[in-house]
Image (cartoon, grey):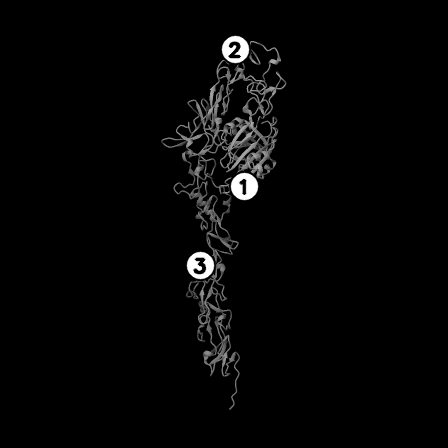
Amino acid sequence: MQNVCERCKPGYNTTDDGLNCVCMPGTWHSCVSGSCTCLSCDKGMFCPGGWRQAKNYAPEDQKGQRLSCEQATVVGAASPINTTTIRANGLTTKSSGAKRPQDCVPMPGFYLASTGRNTQKAALCPKSTYSPGYGRIRQCLKCQSGTEEKPDADYATDVAELSPSSNKMLRVNRTDVCQVGPGRYLVQNVVRDCPAGSFRKAWSQTIESNSRYCFTCPPGVTTNSTRATDQTACNVVAPGVSMNMSTLESAQTQAAAGDNSLASNDVALCPYGTYFPGGVIDSTTNTTCLTCPFGTTTQFLGAASINECQIPPGYYIKVATLGDTLTTCPTNVSGQGYYRSGWTSYTDITARDTTGTTACTACGVGILSALTDIDELGGGNDTSKLVAGSSFSCYIEAGWGMVPAGVVNNTLQYSAVECSNNTYGVANKTYGLQSTPCKPCQRNLITLQPASTNYTQCVNPAGFGYSPGGATGEMSSSVVQCDRCPAGFEFTNGPGSCSACPAGKYQPGYLGNDASGSTPNFGAGLSCLTCPTTLSVYISSNGTEKEFNSTGTTYRTGAASRDECVPKTAQLGIDVGTKFFGNNALLSNITISGSLTSPEGCMDTNCGSTQCCFVQFDYAYRKNGTGGPATRSCLVVKMDAASSSVTNNLLYYKMLPSDAIAAASLTKGGVEAKAMSSGLYARCSLPIAWTAAEVYDDHKAIGKKIANTIPASNLTECKRRCDMMSICWGFTVQGGQCQLRGGIDEQDVRSFFRNPADSTTQGW
């Protein structure tokens, strides 16, 4: 009998012995009711195929098995296999017909926890990770730095939660899983904390626009730290800001709604006499601003520290049993007046006493005082209330004189005297501390009473006539005997020919001092005297006293008194401030080198003789934060002197008397008395470019506005107001309005002005 071999059916492989047919890889052997066939391996399983080495009519388990991806468990024909099972296992294949365990991949939301054939297993992605699936990854992808999973996200934590009825989610998509949390925002693909002063409440996907910004706290309010998550964190009020809880809560609500209109709101500043160092609103007072001690005040709105509480000019702190209080300096006590100039700290013990006679400065024996300076207690705008706030408050009555009375604590003292018979004093009540001696009548003339006020009260004694040389019984018979010139004049072509003193010189008239030879003695009535050279003292940035000399000049011909002499160069007084201009861009920045390393060198090199010249010299001694010198700067602006025909775009500044500056040089600090005006003002044309730059407003471009505007047509009132205020260095005239200007304080800056050359045509 001959055996005939049959060929295996399609889909089968022949075993090595040729006696058996087994399924090919990617299929499995399925027998149902005696009918067997090789079926394609189901998705989610792998089928390695039958054993080629099978012998002796291979058993069913060698003809080709279906194995689950998870741990290679055999899945028979009767075993249920569905998407639920696969989803629970977390392993699948990309398609049917898989042949190897390596064809098994994690489903989305899973990763391979084990890769051995019989141990292969998937696990759920942990918190803040994700997996898109279908790749044999050994761990899930982490969220990018800064992003994280939302805490209340409903993700499955166990495969048991993945039933058909479960709504649990898998961590599949980075956008869904990795979000930007509250208090943070996304910028250039990097998550950053919301900076202080901002907040963000919501969780946001990185593709959402609201993940890219934080909401800004209301103006004047910030947060205690970064990464604020709610508008209520905006509860730290900025220093100097006035706010109550109702206002804050309303602003917080608007900020949380994204109302950007808040950004343009001006915050309310603490009023004069109050301060706020910053922080939360006091729950008991429901406000931020704190009252300065003893009724003291501040120089500006929005003070941020108790150290800004100061005693204004004209005040002292009166020490009393029931409590110390801010009180105005007394005017006249026992025939002597008092004043107090400049601002000082409320802690200054030298500005405290029981009566004000030691805290305030005595004018001098017999010198009275009056209320002449604007009260700066509430901002310095009330011209109806005056105080004795400068030495200009001191005065002598008509017919009196004022003479030096020695030096006390480096300060020149004065006393008043009633002019005796045969002398005469000031013609009217005269303010300010300066040497004003009684003037003797001309030779042989007498007065009929003390306290005469004018040379016309000097008369002949009984029985005498009068000649230009004085009273005589004799009469002059020749012009040669006319050998004295009246005040303000000097001899030019010999006796009898007098001409007015030129600018820069003065002649007080004949005071009984006979000349010796040709030397023009003071009071000899012969030749004009040159205005004195003034030694000025200023304090440099490191506390060192510096000195510079300035020649003097007058601004009219025929000057009769040394009081009309003003220095060509003077420093802005520290009681006024240290800077003329708040906008440095308006000035030229001169390269510092050689002699320019000092204010004098800066002026000498850059200031000519025909223009008004302003110099702001910045020592920059402490500005680099280390206590050592930084980069110095020399800022200069020059303006043309303006004639009297010019009426707009003008800058007027005080010309300070030489004697006042010389006296000030003896005081502590060097420039305390320099704000007293000589009554003269330099008139300069403001640069045309400044008009276009709109620098005449209240924002400190040209000093700071210190009083309400005055019609420019009333220049006399402008000057009077500025004379009354120790903090006023000048005023601008623009657009028909006059605005008084004060200095601006800045560490290490010293400011100087140099007057133009002698001129009698400018109409100062």
What percent of the width, then of the height, locates residue 754?
Answer: 57, 31
Q: Residues within 10 Å of mark 1 (few under 14, many from 20)?
A: few
Q: Residues within 10 Å of mark 3 (few under 14, many from 20)?
A: few
Give the mark nearer the N terminus: 1 vs 3: 3
Tell me whether the residue at label 1 lies in contact with that at label 2, contact meaning CB atoms closer than 8 angstroms.
no
Query: Mark 2 highlights which residue?
Result: 461
Query: Mark 3 highlights which residue?
Result: 153
Query: Mark 1 highlights which residue?
Result: 631
The image quadrant where one finds the C terminus is top right
Residue that protrudes farthest toward the top in the picture: 463
Confirm whether residue 344 shows in the render: yes
Q: Secondary structure at mark 3?
A: loop
560, above or below 80, in the image: above
Count of marks placed on residues: 3
Residue that protrudes farthest toward the front in the picture: 517
Q: Nearer the viewer, residue 601 or 284?
A: 601
Distance from disc 3 to disc 2, alpha carbons, whole Å, reads 116 Å
In which quarter of the view is residue 731 placed?
Answer: top right
Q: Nearer the viewer, residue 563 or 7?
A: 563
Q: Secondary structure at mark 1?
A: loop
